[in-house]
Image: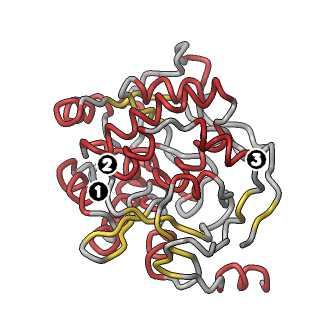
């Protein structure tokens, strides 16, 4: 078992993890950090960049994306221009009673949890620059829309995400946000699922990344381990590179069921233990693939 000491300063998923100044105009945001998208202000150059990003990722989806993700992207078909969030919200409300709300960028945990609990998903309104096409520090509208919105059309996943918001508010009161954030990271952002005996991606951080989309499924380097809530909550993650471990669902109902229980006993157990390293494989893990670690070794050698 590989464990490392817990970092009390480990960042939450809605907090910037670098020292650079946050992008986005927060001066016009409301108390809940929402803002007007003002779709007419996007330039043709931004729409062209969106089309390039969209077409490049869409080409990977049949091979790597979960079925529901592919279905939703086909249904939405916003390949031609940056989407108007109000127009998408109308479709989303009809499907799962969710809506999209525009935000300037990163928002505090409390505001994020509150929006999810009200079935509102915050979407950043700005788009990356051409120089950032392959790597971005903060999530932009492409990450939030292409990565997150498709699964909001799945009723089970949509219900899970609302429950996550409710549990997030509880975690804040208990001082346990960092553990619940790890679940979000390893599922909503970097989760895999088995469909028809094949491993597919559903996490937004994967789906919006050209390089990680294939890496998470095809590369022999990372571990692919069955999802188990307590295991995930006790595992550190990478914020600066590809993940060293991906957790695999059998169905989205696993996520909903995991949060329906009382989480306080789990928090008590996890906080009393040192954390698992991002590349750890434990004796009681259900391992779909034990990674070679070759990617990390190449990076170190370079």
The residue lying toward the viewer, choosing from 141 and 151, is: 151
Of the 4 image quadrants, the one containing the N terminus is bottom right
Residue designated by label 2: 151
Residue positioned 38% across, 23% down in the render = 118
As drawn, 294 above or below 222: below
Percent x, y of residue 205: 50, 56
The tag earlier along the polypeptide, 1 or 2, is: 1
As drawn, 166 above or below 80: above
Colour setting: secondary structure
The tag earlier along the polypeptide, 1 or 3, is: 1
Q: Which mark is residue 272?
A: 3
As drawn, 210 above or below 153: below
Q: Label 3: how many residues lie within 10 Å, few (<14), some (14-19) or many (20+)? A: few
Please name which of the two marks, 1 or 3, marks the residue nearer to the observer: 3
Instruction: Determine the secondary structure under disc 3.
Output: loop
Percent x, y of residue 19: 79, 43
Q: Label 2: how many residues lie within 10 Å, few (<14), some (14-19) or many (20+)? A: many
- Disc 3 and disc 2 in contact, CB within 8 angstroms: no
Instruction: Determine the secondary structure under disc 1.
Output: helix
The tag earlier along the polypeptide, 3 or 2, is: 2
Instruction: Determine the secondary structure under disc 2.
Output: helix
Of the 4 image quadrants, the one containing the C terminus is bottom right
Residue positioned 59% across, 54% down in the render = 136
Residue designated by label 1: 69
Please name which of the two marks, 3 or 2, marks the residue nearer to the observer: 3
Q: Which mark is residue 100?
A: none
- Disc 1 and disc 2 in contact, CB within 8 angstroms: yes
């Amino acid at each position: 078992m590989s464990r490392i000491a817990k970092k009390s300063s480990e960042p939450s998923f809605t907090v910037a993890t670098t020292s650079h100044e946050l992008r986005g105009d927060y001066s016009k945001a409301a108390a809940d950090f929402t803002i007007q998208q003002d779709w007419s202000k996007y330039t043709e150059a931004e729409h062209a960049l969106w089309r390039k990003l969209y077409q490049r990722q869409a080409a990977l989806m049949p091979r790597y994306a979960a079925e529901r993700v592919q279905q939703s992207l086909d249904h939405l078909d916003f390949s031609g221009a940056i989407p108007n969030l109000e127009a998408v919200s109308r479709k989303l409300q009809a499907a799962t009673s969710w809506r999209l709300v525009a935000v300037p960028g990163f928002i505090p945990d409390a505001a994020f949890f509150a929006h999810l609990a009200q079935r509102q998903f915050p979407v950043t309104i700005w788009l990356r620059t051409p120089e950032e096409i392959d790597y971005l520090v903060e999530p932009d509208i492409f990450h939030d829309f292409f990565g997150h919105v498709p699964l909001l059309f799945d009723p089970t996943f949509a219900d899970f995400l609302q429950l996550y918001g409710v549990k997030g508010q509880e975690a804040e009161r208990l001082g346990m946000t960092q553990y619940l954030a790890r679940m979000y990271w390893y599922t909503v952002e970097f989760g895999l699922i088995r469909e028809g005996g094949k491993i597919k991606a559903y996490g937004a951080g994967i789906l919006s990344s050209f390089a990680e989309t294939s890496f998470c499924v095809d590369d022999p380097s990372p571990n692919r381990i069955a999802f188990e809530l307590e295991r995930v909550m006790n595992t550190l993650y990478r914020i600066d590179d590809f993940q060293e471990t991906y957790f695999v669902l059998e169905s989205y109902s696993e996520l909903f069921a995991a949060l329906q229980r009382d989480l306080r006993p789990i928090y008590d157990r996890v906080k009393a233990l040192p954390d698992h390293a991002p590349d750890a494989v434990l004796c009681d893990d259900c391992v779909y693939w034990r990674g070679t670690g070759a990617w990390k070794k190449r990076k170190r050698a370079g």
